[in-house]
Amino acid sequence: MFTIEHDFDATVVTLMDEGEFVLQEDVIINAFSECVTIEQLDPRTDRVQKITLSMRQLHDLGAALDLPEGAYRLTPVKD
């Protein structure tokens, strides 16, 4: 399950784990114009862990999900 909220300066997506097995904490994704942050509570430390991705890193991650093993460098498409 997930929710989407549009705040003043970001779009916030929250991913909630559902199922019968051991569930993970919610993942909160904040999409800003210049970066994306991913947050999740670490129940062992009771602290929120945060990762910040640049827009380029996010683009590369999206491409990586559809590629086989290897090292890649994406280049802009030329008209």
Image: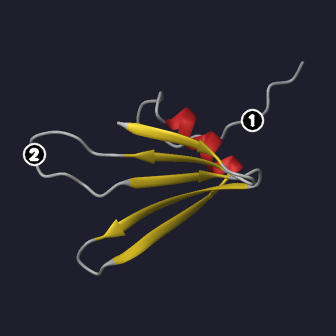
- 24 or 62, which lies in front? 24
User: Residue at the location (43% across, 71% down)?
Assistant: 49
- 38 or 57, which lies in front? 38
List the residue tagged with mark 1.
75
Amino acid type indicated by mark 1: Thr
Tell me if 15 is positioned left or right of 25 in this view: right
Secondary element under disc 1, as helix, strand or loop, is loop
Amino acid type indicated by mark 2: Phe
Q: Residue furthest top?
A: 79
User: Residue at the location (76% across, 55% down)?
Assistant: 34
Tell me if 5 is positioned left or right of 41 in this view: right
User: Residue at the location (86% across, 24% down)?
Assistant: 78
Q: Quadrant of the N terminus?
A: top left
User: Residue at the location (9% across, 41% down)?
Assistant: 20
Q: Position of residue 44 (x, y in %)?
A: 23, 77
Secondary element under disc 2, as helix, strand or loop, is loop
Q: Residue furthest left?
A: 20
Q: Tell me the quarter of the picture where residue 5 sits.
A: top right
Q: Position of residue 40 (x, y in %)?
A: 39, 63
* In the depicted structure, whether residue 63 falls above or below residue 17: above
Mark 2 is surrounded, within 10 Å at the Cα level, by few (under 14), some (14 to 19) or many (20 or more) other residues, namely few
Q: Tell me the quarter of the picture where residue 15 sits.
A: top left
* In the depicted structure, whether residue 74 falls above or below residue 25: above
User: What label does residue 21 carry, if any?
Assistant: 2
